[in-house]
Amino acid sequence: MARPSARMLIVWHSRTGAARQMADAAHEGALEALRELEALERVSVVLRRAAEVTLEEVLAAQGYLFCAPENLATLSGEMKEFFDRCYYGVLDRVNGRPYLALVAAGSDGTGAVRQIERICTGWRLRPLAPAHVVLTHAQTPEQILAPKTLPEHERERCRTLGATMAAWLV
């Protein structure tokens, strides 16, 4: 089998499962698109938790999908730490590569989206599509901390976004 010529990196963090379901769905959609395009040997799709992603993995990818929750009107700490850890090592080394942002939020999501977009602007990445925010409508401490199960239509939207990125990389 030939070594893939392109790599899609899905970086995720999740506390209650919503963002992880979004990342998993995007991963499924990417693999399905590559199967349909008969391109599994040309593009690899890597799904990694934010705390485990290395600078080398970021540099080796040709496209990115960032998936995280919004916590207290901002990007989750683990996802922010990933960006902090890799930020300067990536500058001027990934210019022009595409990215997608998926955010799970209780009622808004714009704070986390704004942070991701600013970081990606600094890395000189190009958004492949507008950020996708899934609202869980969790408002009480109990609802916020409870494990989440996303509706099928939201998982399907994430599969479509994953497929879009994968197809773009073919």
Image: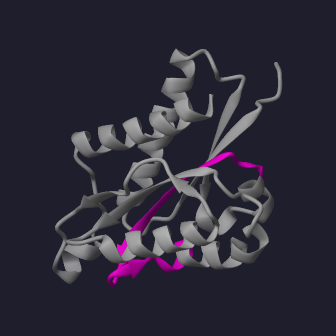
Q: Name the one closer to the observer, 5 or 134.
A: 5
Q: Where's residue 63, x and y in %?
A: 62, 47
User: What residue do we see at 21% from left, 77% from top?
Assistant: 142
Residue 139, quarter of the rendered image: bottom left
Residue 45, quarter of the rendered image: top right
Q: Give the extent of the magenta segment.
A: 60-79
Task: Tell whether position 143 is magenta.
Answer: no
Q: In this view, does 149 lie to the left or right of 7?
A: left
Q: Name the one closer to the observer, 47 or 80.
A: 80
Q: Where's residue 119, x and y in %?
A: 56, 72
Residue 60 to residue 165: above or below: below
Q: Name the one closer to the observer, 109 or 98.
A: 98
Q: In this view, does 26 lie to the left or right of 90?
A: left
User: What residue do we see at 68% from left, 35% from top?
Assistant: 44
Residue 128 to residue 81: above or below: above
Q: In which quarter of the image is the C terminus?
A: top right
Q: Where's residue 149, x and y in %?
A: 27, 53
Q: Name the one closer to the observer, 129 or 53.
A: 129
Q: Where's residue 40, x and y in %?
A: 65, 23
User: What residue do we see at 37% from left, 54% from top?
Assistant: 130
Q: In which quarter of the image is the N terminus?
A: top right
Task: Tell whether position 71 is magenta.
Answer: yes
